[in-house]
Amino acid sequence: MAFVPVPKDLTKVKTKVALNLTKRQLICFGLGGLVGIPAYLFSCGSIGNESAALLMIGLMLPFFSFGIYEKDGQPLEKVLRNFISVSFLRPSARPYRTDNGYAALMRQADFDKEAERIENKTAGKAGKSPASRKKPVQKG
């Protein structure tokens, strides 16, 4: 009877396309090859084989890193984007501020009193009776 191991966490299972590599890995390795091999071929005559090989490795290493590295199911570019946004783009200190509803009501009451005072002052200058002194008209 054949025995096939089945992983317990199926979210970490990746579909292999060719040579036991995922599509992402194949694309990244291919791009690394497209950059590194011509760099080696064009530079080996002028700077020597060892230096050209080191240059090729240095140029291909970022592509390989983006193809292989994953942390918590996130590829390297997402990890770097999160790191940059947390470290440089967002403020490091986030002060705690409460929303005091009572203070907002008190400020609104002060604004209303100020508006009423201004209305009364302008109504007195215009020769009209202030709004607070108006007497209701009784019908009857």
Image (tube, helix red, strand yellow):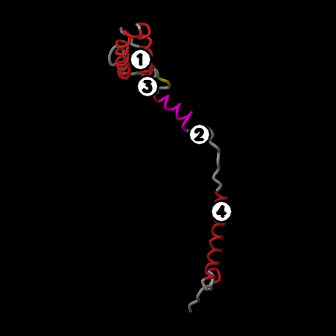
Instruction: Please tell me which residue is depicted at 63% across the width and 39% down the height of the picture.
Output: 93
* Residue 3: quarter of image: top left
What is the CA distance from the residue labelled 1 to the residue labelled 3? 29 Å
Q: Amino acid at mark 4?
A: Arg
Q: Amino acid at mark 1?
A: Met
| Magenta residues, start to end | 78-89
Q: Are marks 2 and 1 in contact (CB under 8 Å)?
A: no
Where is mark 1, residue-wise? Answer: 60
Q: Residue furthest left?
A: 18
Work out which quarter of the rendered image holds the N terminus and state it. top left
Q: Earlier in the sequence, mark 3 or mark 4?
A: 3
Say which mark, if any, is on residue 11: 3
Q: Nearer the viewer, residue 118 or 38?
A: 38
* Residue 2 place in picture, x, y as percent: 36, 9
Q: Secondary structure at mark 2?
A: loop
Where is mark 4, residue-wise? Answer: 107
Question: From the viewer's perspective, is the residue at label 1 or at label 3 nearer?
Answer: 1
Where is mark 2, residue-wise? Answer: 91
* Residue 51 place in picture, x, y as percent: 44, 10
Q: Secondary structure at mark 1?
A: helix
What is the CA distance from the residue labelled 4 to the residue labelled 1? 63 Å
What is the CA distance from the residue labelled 2 to the residue labelled 1? 35 Å
What is the CA distance from the residue labelled 4 to the residue labelled 2? 30 Å
* Residue 75: quarter of image: top left
* Residue 116 place in picture, x, y as percent: 63, 74
Q: Secondary structure at mark 3?
A: helix
Q: Is residue 116 left or right of residue 34?
A: right
Up/down of 50 relative to 116, above or below? above
Work out which quarter of the rendered image holds the C terminus and state it. bottom right
Q: Earlier in the sequence, mark 1 or mark 3?
A: 3
